[in-house]
Image (tube, rainbow, N blue to C red):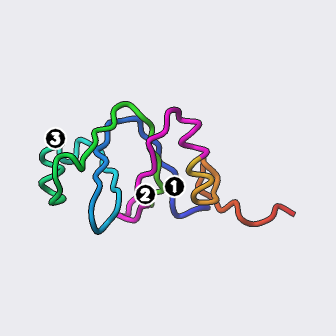
Amino acid sequence: MAFMKPQYVREDFHVIETRHEGCVAIPADVFGTVERAAHEYGVSVDSVELVVGKFWCQLSAPGYLDCTDWDGPHDTLDDARAALADLWDCDPDTGDDDSEDAS
């Protein structure tokens, strides 16, 4: 049984290009506006993109703060599930490790 469980959402995200952290994706409701997201990250408004209506995925430990970065945007839930499985070599439903041979 995996510690980290797959999470999938379809919601708006701010994608923020930073100097030190690279590209960061954060649910848009965290900051509310592109201007606020830019201010919080100390970047220009031009460095923030609002991505609307796409799917995002991550692994998260229920009851803990541990989680991976959000991955996306993906056009469909199936695309998000496939990306999570490929990125983390895990089952897209349970998060169980798929790297061991089933022999």
What amino acid does circle 1 point to? Lys
Whole-angstrom CA distance, mark 1 to mark 3, is 29 Å
In the rendered view, does 8 fall on the left or right side of 83? left
According to the picture, the residue beneath numbered tag 2 turns out to be: 62
The residue nearer to you, when weighing 45 against 70, is 45
Determine whether label 1 and label 3 are within 8 Å by CB.
no
Among the two numbered marks 3 and 2 on one chain, the one whose residue lies closer to the N terminus: 3
Q: Callout 3 environment at 10 Å: few (<14), some (14 to 19), or many (20+)? A: some
Q: Residue at x 45, y 45 (%)?
A: 72
What amino acid does circle 2 point to? Pro
Query: Residue 5 bears which disc, if any?
Result: 1
Among the two numbered marks 2 and 1 on one chain, the one whose residue lies closer to the N terminus: 1
According to the picture, the residue beneath numbered tag 3 turns out to be: 33
- Secondary structure beneath disc 3? loop
Q: Which residues are magenta?
A: 63-82
- Secondary structure beneath disc 1? strand
Q: Residue 68: x, y in percent? A: 44, 61
What amino acid does circle 3 point to? Thr
